[in-house]
Image (tube, rainbow, N blue to C red):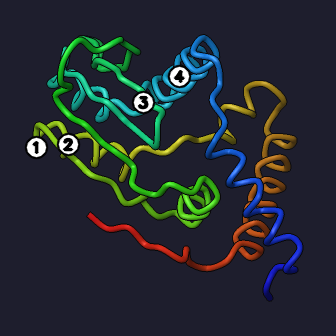
Amino acid sequence: MKPLPALADVATQFSAMLMNFQPPAALVHEVQNRILLLVNHVLLQEPAAIARLQRQHNRTLQLAWRQMQLSCRITPAGLFERVDLEGTPDLSLHISEASPVFLLQSLAQGHKPAMQVQGDVMLAADINWLVDHVRWDLEEDLSRLVGDSLAHQLVSLAQRMLTALKDFLPKSSPAVHTS
């Protein structure tokens, strides 16, 4: 089933608007800090991930998408902290997909986005292992807040909504970037 042409036009216009949006730097840093808090929370639930990152402590990495960048350092505890880099990071990951709609579509379908990778090969291998093996058990976290039954219902609802979104979005982007 194809989305209505009018909805496709709205999605295209929304994507163009997002591509030109420049949030304030303070907001960007606060969102980045919150993202790293979530990533660290998930990492703390996986001892093997912490062990891998502890071997890489004090290494830096930079994740970039369009004009946005997130730079962080691996702490001795095996977690991430946001830093302002003064120089070249040990590992640089630049996401190639420019369209936020197609990037979200790719992520929603469980695909890794196309990216350019530069820097330390061992650090890149450990980051890739994290992406492949570490998963957030959202239902477990929610159950601590609202109980098992409601957590299960909320996660089931979210999964159905994600499935509906996957079915609604086009199956592939018009321009596929590989690197």
The residue pinned by badge 4 equals: 32
The residue wearing badge 2 is 124
Q: Dot 1 surroundings within 10 Å: few (below 14), some, or many (20 or more)? A: few
Label placed on residue 19: none
Q: Amino acid at mark 1?
A: Val
Q: Quadrant of residue 113?
A: bottom left
- Give the camera-side residue of 84 and 146: 84
Kindly identify the residue that appears in the image at 76 percent across and 66 percent down: 165
Q: Is residue 9 above or below residue 95?
A: below
Q: Which residue appears at 16% of the width and 28% of the height?
A: 90
* Alpha carbons under labels 1 and 2: distance apart: 5 Å
Verify CB contact (< 8 Å) between mark 1 and mark 2: yes
Mark 1 or 4 closer to N-term? 4
Quarter holding residue 123: top left
Of the residues tagged 4 and 3, which is closer to the observer? 3
Q: Earlier in the sequence, mark 3 or mark 2?
A: 3
Q: Amino acid at mark 3?
A: Gln
Q: Quadrant of the C terminus?
A: bottom left
Residue, disc 3: 69
Q: Are marks 4 and 2 in contact (CB under 8 Å)?
A: no
The CA distance from mark 4 to mark 3 is 9 Å
Q: Is residue 167 left or right of residue 31?
A: right
How far apart are the alpha carbons under marks 1 and 4? 25 Å
Viewer-side label of 3, 1:
3
x and y percent of residue 117 in the render? 23, 48
- Of the image marks 4 and 3, the number of the one nearer the N terminus: 4
Say what amino acid the circle numbered 2 marks.
Ala
Which element is circle 3 on?
Answer: strand
In the image, residue 29 lies at what x, y percent? 54, 15
The answer to which of marks 4 and 2 sits earlier in the sequence is 4
- Residue 121: numbered disc: 1
